[in-house]
């Protein structure tokens, strides 16, 4: 509707002009409570009020004939609003001819840093000839203020285009005050509709009773919309000169728009409510319209979830750790089945989360994102837990909603993953049915570690019963009994994943071959041994029990090419380290591989010969037999470059040291010296080449001649200068003959040749020496000779009973159970040694072979 006003003969008074100027309100700040920033909210509220006032002033300025150039900026517009019409124009103009805003008003532009943010600012829009509120714009104005320095400045004048001249009134025709041709091309050319919010004049200077403006309209009616519809909705455009307010769910005003402006429909939890009202600028003539309210609600979207897995499942790709081999995992994928039905604008992390969980975990406690919604995954190698250790697992997924107005939460989708059980199979080496000797061992192992869980343990019994989890745990090779039959049963158990696997029972039966009598390995039987420097001991060494048991050290480049048999369970160390660090060098089944350069673990038979190919593996290198575990308070130390080619057998039961009986005494003190002339057959006083101890007990041989010695008891005997003493019965070599000597020595190339089996007993008073190229025995038959050393003294490692000195040679068995036997470098030895202590020095061993069984009881 519109009203007319008869302005005939009526002019605007100064009061009316001031009322027009007062349209622009003084810029004030209103308190506005904001959770984020109270001061910023107050600034924005004041800025909105200032912009509204300036726009009203701009409308009045344009309606009064003012012109704003198309390229004017905000500062130029403010300057325009401060101008007055020239006196010539004012004299013929019906309307406002003065300034439309206070001359003190100045804009405060935003700084460069403020402009880069999203703070609200006022921006002059030349297309619609008004100031607007925006969140961006480099020429934005942060606020408007009053500059008191401008209060006394004279206003500029300008010639304005007269919309309605006084001369027009003479025609007597009624006119509309605001029926003017727009001065700016962008201004609407149609007359404002009823309810435009424009004040109108009545028939006289005094306004009539106020009427009510018509309510504005919306181009889009409210209602309930789907996401698809919502994504395609245009902005809501209000028609008419009214202020459009958008209210959020708690009814706090968000922003204002003017007639013809648009707002995007973006409902919150309670939808989006748009309220509009036509606002009068002349309350005396017109009242504000009633509000027009439209609510745009959303029908929430229902997401759906599907779960798929990677295929066939095993315990190991459901999270069971392997004992060895590469790991594997199962991948379980959840998808939002109707993802493609969601408009892209709504696929945000704030709206949607696709989440997954395993076992009893609630997926609602997990977190995800909208980007995962096309396929979220979980893999078992990320550390799943399996409640109850059952061979199955539940995986669940759902979609969580971050915007209840747009999306409903989905129901929980679940899938049970079930694995096919594995079978744990144990193998035994050697195979069932093998005949073993007491020194051989049985090894158990997993058939394939890649198919065993990491916590597996092999349990076994040796009495034919089926093993349980409480049976003996296999940690090192099994030592069979000395004789009889061994019935071995074994199974693998998994304490943590028992329900995931079946265990196959291994049954193996072994017959143990008994050892013959007191037979023992060839080599040396000693209480302890001392191998120094570059000694090469070829044969087996058996250590006899004693109290206390002596520690033994093998060092330098010494080497035992054979086995070492020891009583009890001594500690076995490698390298020379401080005692506080010995545990780091101590042998155990777990550290067996660390000893590979010290104990080679090759296999040697009882004769000291290496078995090729070997019938048992190199590991373990230390084997416990079935003898007494004590003593355990001594150690074996292998250091430097020393080595044992075979193995160390602990708990070996060595035979007792033999005893040597008193062989009797010589029957006479007769002596003889055998020289070249005394053995001259042409000399009537020559000696016989056969010596009878009953006739001559003491003699020396100092010439290159041969003497045949009859069995019996001799006193002091020595040979030198390549002389030969012959012992034994060459015609009947198996007929053992017995000799005794109070002292016996060969040197200077002399030797004692043994032509048949003999037992020679020497009473210890001084060392029996073979040196200076001397020899004792038969190189072709070292088994012919047994040399005993008799003494009534206590055993001593310092009393040297026998010395095979440099360049000396010995072929046979030495039996010195109470004393020291020394073999020096560059000597020759073939046979066996029984001694309280065996000592080898220098580089002894190049021509040394212990290939006979030592003397023992």
Image (cartoon, grey):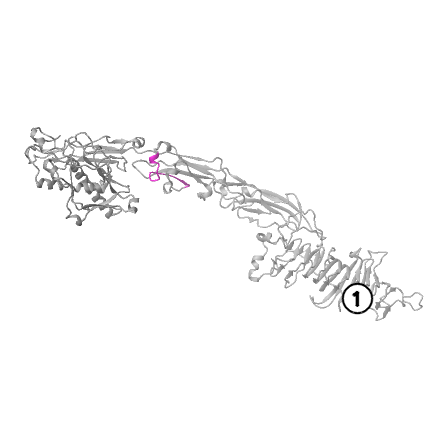
Q: Is residue 144 left or right of residue 447?
A: left
Question: Image check: 133 left or right of 829?
Answer: left
Which stretch did the figure color magenta?
344-359
Q: Quadrant of residue 203?
A: top left
Relative image position of residue 158 (x, y in whole percent): 16, 39
Residue 560 at x, y percent in the picture: 68, 56
Identify the image quadrant of the C terminus: bottom right
Residue 188 in sight: yes
Indicate left or right for 852 with 260 as reference. right
Residue lying furthest front = 88
Which of the two residues, 821 or 198, is positioned nearer the viewer here? 198
The image shows residue 719, relative to residue 357, as above or below, that is below
Locate the N terminus by quadrant: top left
Q: Nearer the viewer, residue 343 or 82?
A: 82
- Vertical placement of residue 746 versus 60, above or below: below
Q: Residue furthest bottom?
A: 669
Q: Position of residue 320 (x, y in %)?
A: 49, 43
Is residue 572 visible in the rendered image? The answer is no
Q: Is residue 518 magenta?
A: no
650 horizontally vs 853: left or right: left
Magenta stretch: includes residue 351: yes
Choose top left, top right, bottom left or bottom right for residue 5.
top left
* Residue that label 1 marks: 744
Q: Give the quarter of the image for residue 678.
A: bottom right
SS for dot 1: strand
Q: Residues within 10 Å of mark 1 (few under 14, many from 20)?
A: many
Q: Position of residue 663 (x, y in %)?
A: 78, 65
Residue at image position (8%, 34%) is 209
């Amino acid at each position: 509707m519109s009203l007319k006003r008869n302005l005939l003969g009526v002019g605007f008074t100064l009061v009316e002009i001031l009322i027009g100027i007062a349209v622009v309100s003084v810029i004030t700040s209103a308190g506005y409570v904001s959770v984020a920033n109270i001061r910023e909210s107050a600034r924005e509220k004041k800025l909105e009020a200032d912009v509204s006032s300036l726009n009203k002033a701009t409308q009045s300025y344009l309606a009064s004939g003012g012109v704003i150039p198309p390229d004017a900026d905000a500062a130029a517009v403010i300057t325009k609003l401060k101008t007055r019409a020239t006196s010539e124009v004012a004299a013929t103009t019906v309307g406002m001819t003065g300034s439309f805003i206070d001359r003190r008003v100045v804009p405060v532009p935003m700084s460069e840093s403020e402009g880069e943010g999203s703070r609200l600012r006022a921006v002059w829009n030349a297309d619609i000839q008004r100031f607007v509120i925006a969140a961006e714009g480099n020429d934005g104005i942060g606020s408007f203020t009053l500059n008191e320095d401008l209060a006394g400045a004279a206003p500029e004048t300008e010639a304005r285009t007269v919309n309605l001249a006084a001369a027009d009134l003479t025609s007597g025709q009624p006119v509309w005050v605001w029926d003017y041709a727009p001065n700016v091309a962008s201004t609407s050319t149609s007359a404002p509709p009823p309810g435009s919010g424009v004040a109108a004049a009545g028939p006289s200077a005094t306004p009539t009773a106020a009427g009510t403006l018509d309510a504005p309209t919306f181009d889009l009616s409210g209602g309930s919309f789907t996401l698809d519809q919502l994504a395609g909705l245009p902005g809501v455009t209000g028609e008419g000169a009214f202020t459009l307010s958008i209210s959020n769910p708690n009814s706090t005003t968000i922003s204002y728009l003017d007639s013809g402006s648009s707002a995007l429909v973006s409902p919150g939890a309670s939808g989006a409510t748009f309220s509009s009202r036509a606002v009068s600028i002349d309350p005396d003539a017109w009242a504000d319209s009633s509000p027009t309210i439209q609510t745009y609600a959303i029908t929430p979207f229902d997401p759906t979830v599907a779960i798929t897995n990677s295929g066939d499942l095993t315990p190991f790709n459901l999270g069971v750790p392997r004992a060895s081999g590469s790991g594997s995992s199962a991948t379980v994928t959840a998808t939002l089945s109707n993802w493609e039905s969601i408009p892209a604008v709504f696929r945000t992390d704030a709206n949607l989360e696709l989440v997954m969980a395993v076992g009893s975990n609630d997926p609602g406690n997990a977190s995800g994102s909208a980007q995962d919604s096309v396929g979220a995954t979980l893999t078992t190698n990320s550390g799943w837990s399996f409640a109850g250790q059952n061979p199955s697992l539940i995986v669940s997924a759902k979609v969580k909603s971050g915007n209840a107005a747009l999306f409903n939460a989905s129901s929980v989708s679940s899938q049970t993953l079930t694995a096919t059980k594995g079978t744990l199979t144990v193998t035994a080496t050697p195979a069932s049915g093998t005949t073993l000797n007491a020194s051989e061992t049985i090894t158990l192992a997993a058939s394939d570690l890649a198919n065993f869980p990491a916590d597996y343990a092999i349990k076994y019994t040796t009495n034919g019963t089926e093993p349980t989890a409480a049976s003996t745990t296999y940690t090192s090779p099994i030592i069979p009994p000395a004789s009889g039959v061994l019935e071995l049963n074994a199974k693998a158990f998994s304490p943590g994943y028992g329900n995931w696997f079946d265990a196959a029972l291994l049954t193996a039966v072994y017959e143990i071959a008994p050892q013959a009598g007191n037979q023992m390995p060839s080599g040396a039987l000693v209480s302890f041994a001392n191998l120094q420097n570059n000694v090469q001991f070829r044969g087996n060494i058996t250590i006899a029990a004693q109290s206390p048991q002596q520690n033994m050290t093998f060092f330098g480049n010494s080497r035992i090419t054979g086995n070492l048999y020891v009583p009890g369970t001594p500690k076995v160390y490698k390298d020379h380290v401080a005692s506080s660090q010995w545990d780091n060098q101590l042998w155990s089944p777990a550290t067996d591989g660390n000893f590979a350069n010290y104990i080679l673990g090759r296999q040697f038979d009882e004769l000291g010969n290496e078995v090729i190919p070997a019938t048992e593996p190199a590991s373990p290198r230390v084997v416990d037999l079935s003898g007494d575990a004590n003593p355990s308070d001594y150690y074996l130390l292998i250091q430097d470059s020393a080595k044992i080619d075979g193995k160390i057998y602990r708990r070996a039961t060595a035979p007792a040291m033999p005893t040597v009986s008193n062989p009797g005494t010589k029957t006479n003190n007769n002596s003889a010296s055998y020289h070249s002339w005394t053995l001259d057959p042409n000399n009537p006083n020559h000696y016989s080449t056969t010596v009878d101890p009953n006739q001559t007990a003491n003699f020396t041989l100092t010439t290159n001649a041969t003497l045949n010695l009859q069995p019996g008891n001799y006193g002091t005997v020595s040979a030198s200068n390549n002389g030969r003493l012959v012992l034994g019965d060459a015609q009947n070599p198996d007929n053992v003959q017995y000799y005794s000597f109070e002292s016996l020595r060969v040197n200077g190339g002399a030797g004692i040749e043994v032509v048949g089996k003999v037992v020679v007993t020497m009473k210890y008073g001084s060392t029996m020496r073979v040196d200076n190229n001397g020899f004792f025995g038969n190189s072709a038959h070292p088994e012919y000779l047994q040399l005993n050393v008799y003494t009534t003294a206590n055993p001593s490692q310092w009393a040297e009973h026998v010395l095979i000195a440099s360049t000396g040679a010995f072929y046979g068995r030495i039996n010195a159970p109470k004393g020291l036997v020394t073999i020096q470098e560059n000597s020759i030895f073939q046979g066996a040694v029984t001694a309280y202590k065996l000592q080898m020095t220098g580089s002894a061993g190049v021509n040394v072979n212990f290939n006979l069984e030592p003397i023992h009881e």
